[in-house]
Amino acid sequence: MVKSDKDMLPYYARKIVQYLSFSLFLYLLLFVDPLTERDLGANVFLRLSPLSAIGAMAAVKVFISAYWPALIILLLTIPFGRFFCAWVCPLGTTIDVADRCFASARKKAHKGIYDGRRLKYYLLAFLLISLFFGQQLVGWFDPISLATSIYTICVHPYVVSLINGILDGFSGMPVVGYVFDLLRQSVHAVLFAQHAPFFRAHGILLVVFVMLISFGMVLRRYWCRNLCPMGALFALFSDWSIFKRTVLSSCTSCGLCVENCGMGAIGEGGQETREGECVLCMTCLKVCPENSIAFRHKQSPEQRSVVDLSKRSFLLTGVLGAVVAPLIKMNYTKAVNKGKASIIRPPGAVDE
């Protein structure tokens, strides 16, 4: 059956929104140094994260009005489902691009690899419980915070340095050198902060980035499927979605939708959809040769597969959070040195 442009419109709409959103994310990060120095809006995407909003508000115990975009995203999840992961999330887009590069390696991966979708729910519970004990760990697992930190600290400095190096090289050339020198000065005024920024945890974030990307050798969107706590939060709110994947009677169970689903949200045969796992990427709609897939408000019970969450595991997560969070908060070295463990004074320096 030949697909019409109207049939493909949802898929292309998702693609356009996803790449426009990612382009805006990169554009803001490219100018992050001067924007931050001038106190302008370089943190737009960070304020889209409901998980970061919960963590920040719990830390200061005050409602932070600047996180109103995160509240809108969470409210939109109720009617539209877990759309944010495939349409907006910069880390999700990064993983999508990387996964395409690992397509051949992934085919050779072991088919029995553990697909632990429940882990993200337990991780979300652990992070929320930790907040009650004053331990702020959300930033290390929030996808937007991770993407912002990785690109800002591990990618941005090298891109700016590369641009600067190229323009410096051309500035020394005869005839055209004067033009490139003017261009270099203009770029410095736009991209560079007046005061050189100081970055911490560069090595740790680089390791985290390599790990997140490497998961793609085994499963597509491994982070989004199994580990992302914000994905778990969206999944909990997506049960009332008016866009549920529905399979029509014309389905021949060819398996193309199962093979192409980046989230692995479709059961064998293509009929069932795992609850809270569909991110409305519309790929199944695109690849279906029979036009047998639609997104509707109602979904028959036999086409719905529930992720089994163990009450015992949630209880264990709660106990673990209650025990581990206070231990992480303790810092013996810092306590012994009266909070000044990180201060190193040169010889002859006086006390503050």
Image: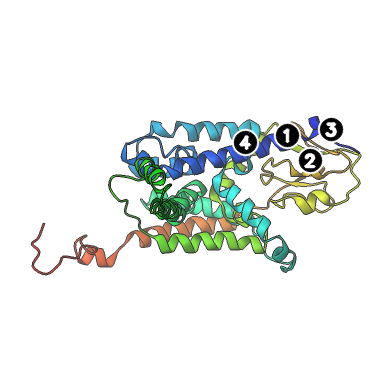
Where 351 sits versus 197, above or below? below
Quadrant of the rendered image containing residue 79: top right
Left or right: 59 with respect to 276?
left
Q: Position of residue 134 (x, y in %)?
A: 36, 50
Q: Residue at x 52, y 50 (%)?
A: 124
Question: Circle 3 is placed at which residue position?
Answer: 4
Circle 3 residues within 10 Å: few <14, some 14–19, many ≥20: few
Which badge, 1 or 3, is on the more N-terminal residue? 3
Circle 2 residues within 10 Å: few <14, some 14–19, many ≥20: many
Residues at badges 1 and 2 in contact (C-beta under 8 Å)? Answer: yes
Residue type for callout 3: Ser
Asked whether residue 118 appears in the rendered view, the answer is no
- Alpha-carbon distance for marks 1 and 3? 12 Å
Question: Circle 4 is placed at which residue position?
Answer: 17
Left or right: 287 with respect to 97?
right
Out of 88 and 326, give the one closest to the viewer. Answer: 88
- Alpha-carbon distance for marks 3 and 2? 12 Å
Quadrant of the rendered image containing residue 56: top left
Q: Position of residue 227 (x, y in %)?
A: 57, 55
Question: Circle 2 is placed at which residue position?
Answer: 285
